């Protein structure tokens, strides 16, 4: 069967796709631009949540480029039939985060935006995680009109409600031009996640995401989020800027109900929790596992475990509730490197986490992030030898730390002369310890020959 038109309906069996047209205010076209299928195709959960939160007051259409055979033709069809007055472009990936062969993704986006300008005068609004990291840089590079930093559900609704004559200075996270200068309003995280509607999967193609295979040749998953925010202060991470340090949670029953509804409506069985810390807060994680278990549905899911919170009881609950694999964010096996990365846990806690997961029989994979401050051949070998003592299902190896603004690694790279204040970090640059820069590549090549399940 051919792929249905994104303009008309979704890939949800044969049911008609909702039009989104209720009463007229401002006509909005949402575009999910990402088409990268690294690991598995990532469902645009953030945009689906923004779409759901817009409400019935504004007419809208949604285009998702992930599986679109001819995205520009679909855009042209919407521009002709719908004539949007605002175009919201969601941007996810900046680059491939590969220090050996860095690939910057936005030239293609720039070409699209230039093409779009020749077919419509509608203002272009940017959003998504990539934009939140580099707001002014992307506005200038893509020649867009405005954008929203941070969580967009309430902010975009406020923008649509006030367009075009409202007071934009009151819209959280809005970046816009005034008197020839960019102004960035402070973002405001959503305080009550339970007040948000479930993400509007019906405007996308959830079955295709569930069935599609990515570069890792693994089956697709549906993403789900139960909490936002991360209290950890890893020195390279952008989560604090995107979601804040305070953890906000959804009621476990609501999260479980979303998974159940996805299963009953579309047959979605595999889920991936995008929460940065599934095992924190511990009591919340336990309650969520029990809520999922009580569904009594044949669901399988994965989540990210932080070694700062090893908990045998919770790991038992994970397995009983349908978790089939835990992703352990260990990053290193060296206490020196863990400290320098600001991880906030020790090698001992990493080992305790591995031991408990193996004790309860829950498969896990691991991450090793090489090349940070203080990394030497000895610390690299220490990390490799640690994982060789255990039995991870998969190990992801990364060399070099992508430098983002507003992070500790940025400050250190600046102080050491790795970057300069004039550098536009929209183009990828990496922190890589000089002590391992020339040696590590051949060493890791030899390591992966010994371990076919270690990806480099």
Image (tube, helix red, strand yellow):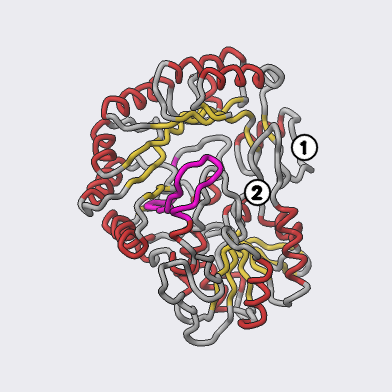
Q: Measured from the top left, where is residue 21 in percent x and y?
A: 50, 83
Q: Is residue 121 above or below residue 202?
A: below
Label 1 element class? loop
Q: Is residue 393 above or below residue 423?
A: above
Q: Residue at x 49, y 78 (%)?
A: 20
Q: Which residue is mark 1?
A: 420
Q: Is residue 211 magenta?
A: yes
Q: Nearer the viewer, residue 395 or 97?
A: 395
Q: Is residue 185 visible to the viewer in this orientation of the structure?
A: no
Circle 2 Cα neighbour tier, 10 Å, few/some/many (<14 / 14–19 / ≥20):
many
Q: Which residue is mark 2?
A: 94
Q: Which mark is residue 141?
A: none
**Is residue 271 rendered to the left or right of residue 311?**
right
The answer to whether marks 2 and 1 mark residues whose Cβ atoms lie closer than 8 Å is no
Label 2 element class? loop
Q: Main secondary structure of the magenta part?
A: loop
């Amino acid at each position: 069967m051919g792929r249905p038109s994104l303009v008309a309906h979704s890939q949800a069996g044969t049911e008609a796709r909702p039009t989104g047209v209720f009463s007229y205010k401002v006509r909005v076209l949402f575009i999910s631009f990402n088409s990268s299928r690294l690991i598995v195709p990532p469902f645009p959960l953030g945009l689906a949540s923004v779409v759901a939160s817009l409400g019935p007051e504004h007419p809208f259409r949604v285009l998702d480029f992930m599986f679109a055979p001819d995205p520009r033709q679909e855009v042209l069809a919407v521009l002709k039939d719908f004539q949007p007055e605002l175009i919201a472009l969601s941007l996810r990936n900046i680059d491939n985060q590969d220090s050996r062969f860095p690939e910057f993704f936005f030239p293609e986006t720039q070409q699209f935006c230039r093409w779009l300008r020749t077919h419509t005068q509608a203002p272009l609004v940017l959003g998504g995680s990539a934009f939140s990291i580099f707001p002014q840089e992307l506005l200038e590079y893509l020649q867009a009109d405005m954008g929203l930093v941070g969580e967009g559900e309430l902010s975009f609704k406020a923008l649509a409600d006030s367009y075009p004559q409202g007071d934009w200075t009151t819209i959280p996270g809005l970046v816009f031009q005034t008197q020839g200068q960019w102004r960035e309003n402070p973002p405001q995280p959503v305080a009550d996640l339970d007040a948000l509607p479930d993400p509007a999967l019906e405007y996308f193609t959830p079955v295709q995401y569930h069935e599609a295979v990515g570069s890792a040749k693994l089956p697709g998953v549906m993403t789900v989020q139960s909490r936002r925010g991360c209290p950890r202060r890893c020195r390279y991470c952008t989560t604090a800027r995107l979601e804040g340090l305070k953890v906000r949670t959804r009621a476990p029953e609501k999260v479980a109900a979303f998974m159940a509804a996805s299963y009953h409506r579309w047959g979605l069985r595999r889920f991936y929790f995008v929460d940065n810390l599934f095992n924190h807060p511990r009591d919340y994680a336990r309650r969520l596992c029990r809520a999922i278990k009580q569904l009594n549905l044949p669901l399988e899911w994965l989540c990210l475990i932080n070694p700062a919170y090893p908990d045998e009881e919770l790991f038992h609950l994970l397995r009983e509730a349908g978790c089939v694999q835990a992703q352990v964010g260990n990053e290193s096996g060296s206490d020196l490197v863990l400290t320098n990365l600001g991880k906030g846990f020790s090698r001992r806690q990493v080992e305790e986490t591995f031991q408990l997961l193996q004790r309860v029989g829950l498969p896990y994979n691991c991450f090793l992030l090489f090349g940070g401050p203080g990394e030497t051949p000895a610390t690299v070998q220490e990390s490799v030898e640690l994982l060789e003592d255990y039995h991870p299902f998969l190990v992801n190896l990364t060399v070099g730390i992508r430098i983002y603004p507003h992070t500790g690694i940025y400050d250190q790279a600046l102080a050491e002369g790795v970057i300069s204040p004039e550098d536009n970090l929209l183009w990828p640059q990496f922190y890589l310890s000089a002590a391992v820069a020339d040696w590590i590549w051949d060493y890791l090549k030899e390591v992966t020959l010994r371990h076919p399940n270690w990806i480099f």
